[in-house]
Image (tube, helix red, strand yellow):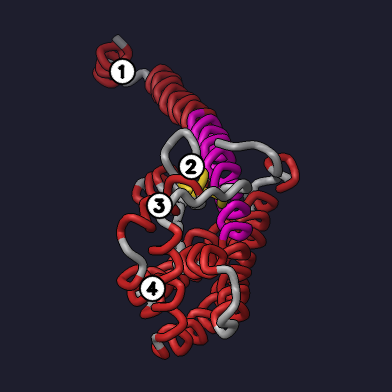
Amino acid sequence: MILSRTIEHLKQQHWTGVFIELVIVILGVFIGIQVSNWNQSREDARLGQDYVRRLTFDLKGDLVKAREQTVYYENVFQAVQHTAEVLKEQDSDPKDLVISAYRATEVIFRPPNLATWNQIVSSGHLELLPKGAIEGGLADYYAYNGTLDAYNQLKGARYRRLVRSIIPISIQKAIRAGCSDIRDSEGFAFRFMKQCKLDADPALVRSTAQALRNNPKVATALRFQYSLLASGVPNFKANVTVISKALAALGVHSDESKDARP
Protein backbone atom coordinates (compact mmCIF):
# COMPACT_ATOMS: atom_id res chain seq x y z
CA MET A 1 0.00 0.00 0.00
CA ILE A 2 2.78 2.38 0.89
CA LEU A 3 4.55 1.57 -2.36
CA SER A 4 1.43 2.26 -4.45
CA ARG A 5 0.84 5.58 -2.69
CA THR A 6 4.46 6.56 -3.20
CA ILE A 7 4.24 5.82 -6.93
CA GLU A 8 1.05 7.88 -7.14
CA HIS A 9 2.73 10.78 -5.34
CA LEU A 10 5.67 10.56 -7.73
CA LYS A 11 3.38 10.68 -10.74
CA GLN A 12 1.67 13.77 -9.33
CA GLN A 13 5.00 15.17 -8.10
CA HIS A 14 3.71 15.45 -4.54
CA TRP A 15 7.18 15.56 -3.01
CA THR A 16 5.98 16.10 0.52
CA GLY A 17 3.93 12.94 0.34
CA VAL A 18 6.91 11.06 -1.14
CA PHE A 19 9.10 12.26 1.72
CA ILE A 20 6.58 11.22 4.37
CA GLU A 21 6.17 7.78 2.84
CA LEU A 22 9.95 7.28 2.73
CA VAL A 23 10.27 8.35 6.36
CA ILE A 24 7.59 5.83 7.31
CA VAL A 25 9.42 3.07 5.43
CA ILE A 26 12.79 3.94 6.98
CA LEU A 27 11.32 4.11 10.48
CA GLY A 28 9.60 0.79 9.96
CA VAL A 29 12.84 -0.87 8.84
CA PHE A 30 14.75 0.71 11.75
CA ILE A 31 12.21 -0.40 14.33
CA GLY A 32 12.13 -3.88 12.83
CA ILE A 33 15.91 -4.14 13.08
CA GLN A 34 15.89 -2.87 16.66
CA VAL A 35 13.20 -5.33 17.68
CA SER A 36 15.12 -8.15 16.01
CA ASN A 37 18.33 -7.12 17.77
CA TRP A 38 16.51 -6.88 21.08
CA ASN A 39 15.03 -10.35 20.62
CA GLN A 40 18.46 -11.74 19.69
CA SER A 41 20.03 -10.13 22.76
CA ARG A 42 17.37 -11.69 24.95
CA GLU A 43 17.93 -15.08 23.33
CA ASP A 44 21.73 -14.76 23.71
CA ALA A 45 21.34 -13.82 27.38
CA ARG A 46 19.02 -16.78 27.97
CA LEU A 47 21.39 -19.16 26.17
CA GLY A 48 24.38 -17.78 28.07
CA GLN A 49 22.59 -18.34 31.38
CA ASP A 50 21.75 -21.89 30.32
CA TYR A 51 25.40 -22.54 29.44
CA VAL A 52 26.51 -21.25 32.85
CA ARG A 53 23.97 -23.46 34.59
CA ARG A 54 25.07 -26.55 32.66
CA LEU A 55 28.78 -25.81 33.06
CA THR A 56 28.30 -25.31 36.78
CA PHE A 57 26.56 -28.68 37.05
CA ASP A 58 29.34 -30.37 35.05
CA LEU A 59 32.14 -28.72 37.03
CA LYS A 60 30.58 -29.52 40.41
CA GLY A 61 30.39 -33.16 39.38
CA ASP A 62 33.97 -33.06 38.10
CA LEU A 63 35.11 -31.51 41.37
CA VAL A 64 33.60 -34.32 43.41
CA LYS A 65 35.30 -36.87 41.16
CA ALA A 66 38.61 -35.00 41.30
CA ARG A 67 38.59 -34.94 45.09
CA GLU A 68 37.81 -38.65 45.20
CA GLN A 69 40.58 -39.45 42.72
CA THR A 70 43.05 -37.46 44.81
CA VAL A 71 42.18 -39.39 47.97
CA TYR A 72 42.26 -42.67 46.06
CA TYR A 73 45.75 -42.10 44.69
CA GLU A 74 46.97 -40.91 48.08
CA ASN A 75 45.88 -44.32 49.37
CA VAL A 76 47.65 -46.06 46.48
CA PHE A 77 50.76 -44.03 47.29
CA GLN A 78 50.53 -45.15 50.92
CA ALA A 79 50.26 -48.76 49.73
CA VAL A 80 53.42 -48.32 47.66
CA GLN A 81 55.35 -47.05 50.66
CA HIS A 82 53.96 -49.75 52.94
CA THR A 83 54.82 -52.43 50.39
CA ALA A 84 58.41 -51.15 50.25
CA GLU A 85 58.65 -51.61 54.03
CA VAL A 86 57.16 -55.10 54.33
CA LEU A 87 58.76 -56.40 51.14
CA LYS A 88 62.22 -56.36 52.69
CA GLU A 89 61.07 -58.05 55.91
CA GLN A 90 61.18 -61.81 55.59
CA ASP A 91 58.96 -62.28 58.65
CA SER A 92 56.28 -59.76 57.64
CA ASP A 93 52.66 -60.91 57.39
CA PRO A 94 52.25 -62.60 53.97
CA LYS A 95 48.64 -61.49 53.70
CA ASP A 96 49.61 -57.89 54.47
CA LEU A 97 52.33 -57.96 51.79
CA VAL A 98 50.14 -59.47 49.08
CA ILE A 99 47.23 -57.09 49.70
CA SER A 100 49.47 -54.04 49.92
CA ALA A 101 51.47 -55.01 46.82
CA TYR A 102 48.24 -55.42 44.87
CA ARG A 103 46.72 -52.17 46.10
CA ALA A 104 49.88 -50.38 45.01
CA THR A 105 48.95 -51.33 41.42
CA GLU A 106 45.44 -49.86 41.46
CA VAL A 107 44.39 -47.09 39.05
CA ILE A 108 41.18 -45.20 38.39
CA PHE A 109 40.23 -42.38 36.05
CA ARG A 110 37.08 -40.31 35.84
CA PRO A 111 37.12 -38.24 32.63
CA PRO A 112 35.71 -34.72 32.75
CA ASN A 113 32.25 -34.04 31.38
CA LEU A 114 33.00 -32.23 28.11
CA ALA A 115 29.56 -32.23 26.47
CA THR A 116 28.54 -28.68 27.38
CA TRP A 117 32.00 -27.18 26.81
CA ASN A 118 32.36 -28.86 23.41
CA GLN A 119 28.91 -27.58 22.39
CA ILE A 120 29.84 -24.02 23.38
CA VAL A 121 33.12 -24.15 21.47
CA SER A 122 31.71 -25.82 18.35
CA SER A 123 28.81 -23.35 18.25
CA GLY A 124 31.13 -20.35 18.57
CA HIS A 125 29.30 -19.18 21.69
CA LEU A 126 32.24 -18.48 23.99
CA GLU A 127 31.29 -14.79 24.01
CA LEU A 128 27.98 -15.68 25.68
CA LEU A 129 29.77 -16.75 28.87
CA PRO A 130 30.33 -14.24 31.70
CA LYS A 131 33.01 -11.66 31.00
CA GLY A 132 36.43 -12.90 32.10
CA ALA A 133 35.28 -16.50 32.64
CA ILE A 134 37.46 -17.92 29.86
CA GLU A 135 40.59 -16.10 31.00
CA GLY A 136 39.69 -16.58 34.67
CA GLY A 137 40.24 -20.33 34.68
CA LEU A 138 37.55 -22.00 32.58
CA ALA A 139 39.71 -22.59 29.51
CA ASP A 140 42.63 -23.72 31.71
CA TYR A 141 40.58 -26.55 33.17
CA TYR A 142 39.39 -27.93 29.85
CA ALA A 143 42.95 -27.76 28.50
CA TYR A 144 44.46 -29.46 31.59
CA ASN A 145 45.68 -33.01 30.96
CA GLY A 146 47.95 -33.67 33.95
CA THR A 147 45.59 -36.25 35.46
CA LEU A 148 45.22 -38.15 32.20
CA ASP A 149 49.00 -38.26 31.78
CA ALA A 150 49.42 -39.54 35.34
CA TYR A 151 46.72 -42.18 34.84
CA ASN A 152 48.22 -43.43 31.58
CA GLN A 153 51.67 -43.74 33.15
CA LEU A 154 50.36 -45.66 36.14
CA LYS A 155 48.11 -47.87 34.04
CA GLY A 156 51.05 -48.94 31.89
CA ALA A 157 53.58 -49.10 34.74
CA ARG A 158 55.96 -52.03 34.84
CA TYR A 159 55.20 -52.64 38.52
CA ARG A 160 51.51 -53.07 37.79
CA ARG A 161 52.15 -55.61 35.04
CA LEU A 162 54.77 -57.49 37.07
CA VAL A 163 52.87 -57.81 40.35
CA ARG A 164 49.62 -58.79 38.66
CA SER A 165 51.50 -61.46 36.71
CA ILE A 166 52.92 -62.92 39.95
CA ILE A 167 49.77 -62.92 42.11
CA PRO A 168 47.59 -65.92 41.17
CA ILE A 169 44.17 -65.28 39.70
CA SER A 170 42.41 -66.90 42.66
CA ILE A 171 44.07 -64.45 45.05
CA GLN A 172 43.35 -61.51 42.75
CA LYS A 173 39.68 -62.52 42.76
CA ALA A 174 39.71 -62.76 46.55
CA ILE A 175 41.33 -59.32 46.85
CA ARG A 176 38.80 -57.77 44.50
CA ALA A 177 35.96 -59.40 46.41
CA GLY A 178 37.01 -58.42 49.91
CA CYS A 179 39.90 -55.93 49.84
CA SER A 180 39.57 -53.84 46.73
CA ASP A 181 37.43 -50.92 45.58
CA ILE A 182 34.12 -49.44 46.59
CA ARG A 183 32.17 -48.40 43.50
CA ASP A 184 29.46 -45.79 43.00
CA SER A 185 26.08 -46.26 41.33
CA GLU A 186 27.70 -45.82 37.91
CA GLY A 187 30.25 -48.57 38.60
CA PHE A 188 33.24 -46.28 39.07
CA ALA A 189 35.72 -46.98 41.88
CA PHE A 190 36.28 -44.08 44.24
CA ARG A 191 37.93 -45.52 47.40
CA PHE A 192 39.30 -48.70 48.98
CA MET A 193 37.21 -50.88 51.24
CA LYS A 194 37.79 -49.92 54.86
CA GLN A 195 37.33 -53.47 56.13
CA CYS A 196 39.65 -55.86 54.27
CA LYS A 197 38.90 -59.58 54.25
CA LEU A 198 41.02 -61.92 52.14
CA ASP A 199 39.33 -65.27 51.70
CA ALA A 200 42.17 -67.25 50.11
CA ASP A 201 44.25 -70.37 50.74
CA PRO A 202 46.83 -69.38 53.42
CA ALA A 203 49.49 -71.61 51.87
CA LEU A 204 49.00 -69.96 48.48
CA VAL A 205 49.14 -66.52 50.09
CA ARG A 206 52.45 -67.42 51.77
CA SER A 207 53.98 -68.73 48.55
CA THR A 208 52.80 -65.62 46.68
CA ALA A 209 54.34 -63.33 49.28
CA GLN A 210 57.59 -65.25 49.02
CA ALA A 211 57.52 -65.00 45.22
CA LEU A 212 57.18 -61.21 45.54
CA ARG A 213 60.11 -61.06 47.98
CA ASN A 214 62.33 -63.33 45.90
CA ASN A 215 61.86 -61.47 42.63
CA PRO A 216 64.35 -58.57 42.56
CA LYS A 217 62.43 -56.95 39.71
CA VAL A 218 59.53 -56.29 42.06
CA ALA A 219 61.57 -54.04 44.34
CA THR A 220 63.11 -52.27 41.34
CA ALA A 221 59.74 -51.65 39.70
CA LEU A 222 58.28 -50.56 43.05
CA ARG A 223 60.85 -47.78 43.32
CA PHE A 224 59.74 -46.41 39.95
CA GLN A 225 56.10 -46.81 40.99
CA TYR A 226 56.92 -44.59 43.96
CA SER A 227 58.37 -42.00 41.60
CA LEU A 228 55.28 -42.06 39.37
CA LEU A 229 52.95 -41.50 42.30
CA ALA A 230 55.19 -38.90 43.91
CA SER A 231 54.62 -36.77 40.81
CA GLY A 232 51.15 -38.07 39.97
CA VAL A 233 49.40 -37.29 43.26
CA PRO A 234 50.25 -33.56 43.00
CA ASN A 235 48.72 -33.58 39.51
CA PHE A 236 45.45 -34.90 40.91
CA LYS A 237 45.56 -32.30 43.69
CA ALA A 238 46.24 -29.60 41.11
CA ASN A 239 43.18 -30.70 39.17
CA VAL A 240 41.01 -29.91 42.21
CA THR A 241 42.49 -26.41 42.29
CA VAL A 242 41.97 -25.89 38.55
CA ILE A 243 38.31 -26.93 38.77
CA SER A 244 37.76 -24.66 41.76
CA LYS A 245 39.16 -21.76 39.76
CA ALA A 246 36.90 -22.61 36.82
CA LEU A 247 33.87 -22.57 39.12
CA ALA A 248 34.99 -19.27 40.63
CA ALA A 249 35.25 -17.85 37.11
CA LEU A 250 31.54 -18.64 36.73
CA GLY A 251 30.77 -17.03 40.08
CA VAL A 252 30.41 -20.29 42.05
CA HIS A 253 32.28 -21.02 45.28
CA SER A 254 33.85 -24.48 45.17
CA ASP A 255 32.83 -25.29 48.77
CA GLU A 256 29.23 -25.42 47.56
CA SER A 257 30.01 -28.76 45.92
CA LYS A 258 32.36 -30.18 48.54
CA ASP A 259 30.01 -32.87 49.82
CA ALA A 260 27.77 -33.37 46.80
CA ARG A 261 28.00 -36.34 44.48
CA PRO A 262 26.75 -35.98 40.89
Which residue in the structure is indicated by mark 4? Answer: 163
Circles 3 and 2 in contact, beta carbons < 8 Å:
no
Q: CA distance from mark 3 to mark 2?
A: 33 Å
Q: CA distance from mark 4 to mark 1?
A: 92 Å
The first of marks 4 and 2 along the sequence is: 4
Q: Which residue is mark 3?
A: 121
Q: Name the image quarter holding residue 171.
A: bottom left
Residue flagged by tag 2: what amino acid is it? Arg
- How far, Cα to Cα, is label 3 from label 4? 43 Å
Identify the element where label 4 is drawn.
Answer: helix
Mark 3 in CB contact with mark 1 (< 8 angstroms)? no
Q: Neighbour class for label 3 at 10 Å: few (<14), some, many (≥20)?
A: few
**Residue labelled with disc 2:** 183
Q: Which quadrant holds residue 170? A: bottom left
* Nearer mark to the viewer, of 1 and 2: 2
Q: Measuring from the top left, give residue 173's x and y in whole percent.
A: 36, 51
Q: Residue at x 45, y 28 (%)?
A: 36
